[in-house]
Amino acid sequence: MSRFFAGSVLLCACMVELSWVSSARATEVEGEQSGVWSAEHNPYLMTGDVVVPPGGILAITPGVVVRALGHYRIIVQEATLLAVGSPNAPITMTADDVLTGWRGILLQGATDDSTVSHTIITYSKGTGDAMEVGGGAIKIRDCAPTISYNVFRFNSSHNQNFNGTGGAVCARLSSASIVNNMMFQNSADSGGAIYAGDWGSPLISGNIVVGNSAELKGGGINIGARSTALVEHNIVIGNRCDSSVNGGGGITSWTGFGLFGTFAVYRNNLVAFNTAATAGGGMYLRYDRGIITNNLIAFNFAPSGGGIHAINFPSSAPILSNNVIWGNTATIEGPQIDLNENTGSEIDVTYSIVQGGWPGVGNIDADPMFIAIPNPGPDGQWGTDDDDLGNLRVLPDSPAIGAGDPFLTDDPGETDLDGHARVLCDFIDMGPYEFGIGDYNCDQTVDLDDYAFFTQCLTGPNGGPLEPGCAPFDFNADGAIDLRDAAGFQRAFMEFTP
């Protein structure tokens, strides 16, 4: 397991335990609330819904513990919520009765300054009719808050009509920033961890989405109708979709391009070890013109389309480039990519590694040479403490290195999944990780020949601009090459020097 992932799981477990502190000096809250909640008044016991009045601001500060004594909610409409913990003192929000749960946070028409950050949210349950059920932990509508560096676990959104969306976060009519969160063991009817739809342009970036589930579609993430989401730098592992009709163990993309002209962009994501009961173990692309670039879609399973299942009309075919699609399995057809024949489905794949081959310019069928394959650990279950996320970066001499579209240029500021420059050695790689950090002369080793140029590239702590060719030395992607990068170079030197 990665240190980040293991630490977050442990932190979550510890903070859930802390939420059950003595109520002897508790602060009971319900009705209109504004001002500041601070840890010195812990725990805050919700005895009813909490409402931040229009124009009001509720600031919840580091270390605060909020415990709901019933299925209650924090409601923020035309107001501001600033729930901002810290890495060492996160906020905790949970339910007194984990079976009943609580109702999480509603941000509807809230100010765009609203922020939920460094907060651990557990046992929130979305229930009710189609208008009420969405968003297990956080429901966002008609606003663009920031949801970052949180841990979401054991949250859900379900009803008997399968209208539940976003076990952790549901965003509609929203350009929210949903970034750098940990989401594991959440569930929903659609979008086990995240659902985004209804005209929004949210940023969904840097999240670790592991071990979530959906009844209908999108075990990890579901991008729905009329959405123009940017989905990048996410790790989507071990999620599942149980539907006998739809699919998408890892990601479902169903934006309705033919009707609305909307589509999502997926780039620099890792989608692995997800499963679907019917189709699209990794990704399920339904009537969607998704732009899918530099992703790794590997070791997923579904009866049809272990890696990708696409159902569309030819005019809305998804466009894939620079991807690695490998090691996926299926029991009926299309282990890597499967096209639904009933609608004349098509898919445009170029400059990608596809196991078994696939028609298209620049496509190759060759082992990408991963460093270490992930596994769920002895318990066989993703999203638990013994997960081993492995290392799906590639080894030197991988056919993915420098084999991407030679005419493709990265967007300004675009980085790979590690946060390094998207192009390091002249030509872009296939997959989410760019090989070559520390490799100044691009010979696929990091050695003394590269070190000879390191001092020439130094900018000092005040930053660049970087000299041409110096991006391989910017290990922490901060635009400066300094002593912090020297430590990264030393690690790379020890790892790659023969």
Image (spheres, rainbow, N blue to C red):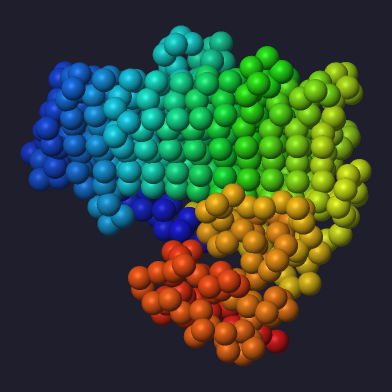
- The quarter in which the C terminus is drawn is bottom right
**Along the viewing direction, whichever of 95 and 445 lies nearer the viewer:** 445
* Residue 376 pos. (x, y %): 61, 53
Regarding residue 472, the answer to whether it shows in the image is: no
* Residue 468 pos. (x, y %): 58, 71
- The quarter in which the N terminus is drawn is bottom right
Residue at the (32%, 51%) spot, across then down: 14
- In the shown orientation, is residue 281 left or right of residue 7? right
Regarding residue 283, the answer to whether it shows in the image is: yes
Task: Count the numbered circles shown.
Answer: 0
Q: In which quarter of the image is residue 365?
A: bottom right
Residue at the (70%, 76%) spot, across then down: 442
Q: Residue furthest left?
A: 25
Q: In which quarter of the image is residue 292?
A: top right
* Residue 100 pos. (x, y %): 36, 23
Q: Quadrant of residue 229?
A: top right
Reply above or below: 405 against 43.
below
